[in-house]
Amino acid sequence: MTTPLLEINDVSVSFDGFFALTDLSLSLLPGELRSIIGPNGAGKTTFLDVITGKVQPLKGTVTFRGDSLLGLSEHKITRLGIGRKFQTPRVFENLPVIRNLELAASPSKQPLALLSQSIPPAVRDEVQRLLDYVGLAPYAKVLAGSLSHGQKQWLAIAMLVAQSPQVLLLDEPVAGLTDEETTRTAELIKSLAGDHTVLVIEHDMEFIRDLNAPVTVLHQGSVLTEGSLDQVQKHPRVIEVYLGQAED
């Protein structure tokens, strides 16, 4: 039996008496692709906040490669190999696309060194590979701020991959994208699984279907059910939850 890479066990999070997560448990295997869905207030963002150290749980455990993540800073957790892409793509809009990737891929993380040092040949090669991989090679010298929203999402994903994380946490990667961009993003994310463990939070059901990955449904801070998209969509409680509440 394969040992989970990332495990969340019986995690509860309370904000002034309101439980955003209640006894939530979930595990991810090496190389797995997993989709997370749930209505507004289900706890999806809080779930990611706990994994990345932004929020400390009231109870429960979070382990990565068998070691606890609790009490570690966000920076330390990132260095351990857990990368997160937020809903809004975070790119350096006043820098060219290629420079964004060079900064992300650079082995040095000191601000002054990042701006002044020369880029090692191995990093240049990896940057070019990523530009080709996400289809941004023709825009390498274009300022990132002039990219379309979808292209910024791809750049943000490429910048995350450039940091060589074992786990990629992607929060709404197709929000605001065209149908064509959404399809392209699904193919991109599927191609990342295997080399990386990928967890995707989304509300676009057609995109979730395109991913063709196991789905975990969150509701009121707990796991409601898990399975294929077809299986969870037929679950009576899922039907009740989605008919009664809007998604985020």
Image (tube, rainbow, N blue to C red):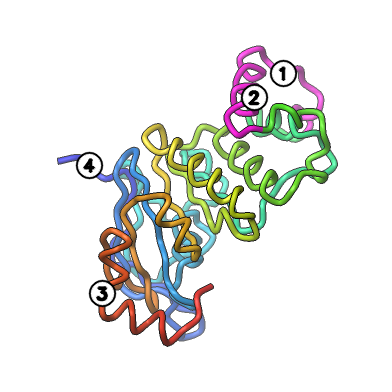
Q: Which residue is mark 3?
A: 235
Element type where label 3 sits in the image: loop
Q: Which residues are magenta?
A: 112-135
Question: How packed is label 3: few (under 14 Cα within 10 Å), some, or many (20 or more)?
Answer: some
**Mark 4 or 2, nearer chain start:** 4
Q: Residues within 10 Å of mark 1 (few under 14, many from 20)?
A: some
Q: Is residue 132 magenta?
A: yes
Closest to the camera, between mark 4 and mark 2, is: 2
Q: CA distance from mark 1 to mark 4?
A: 37 Å
Circles 3 and 4, Cβ within 8 Å, touching? The answer is no
Q: Residue at x 45, y 72 (%)?
A: 43
Q: Amino acid under label 3?
A: His
Report if the CB atoms under discs 1 and 2 are less than 8 Å apart: yes
Residue at the limit of the structure toward the top, as seen here: 121
Instruction: In the rendered view, tell whether residue 137 sits above or below residue 248.
Output: above
- Circle nearer the N terminus (2, 3): 2
Mark toward the viewer: 1 or 2: 2
Residue that badge 4 annotates: 3
Report the disc number at residue 155. Answer: none
The spot of residue 174 in percent (x, y) is 57, 55
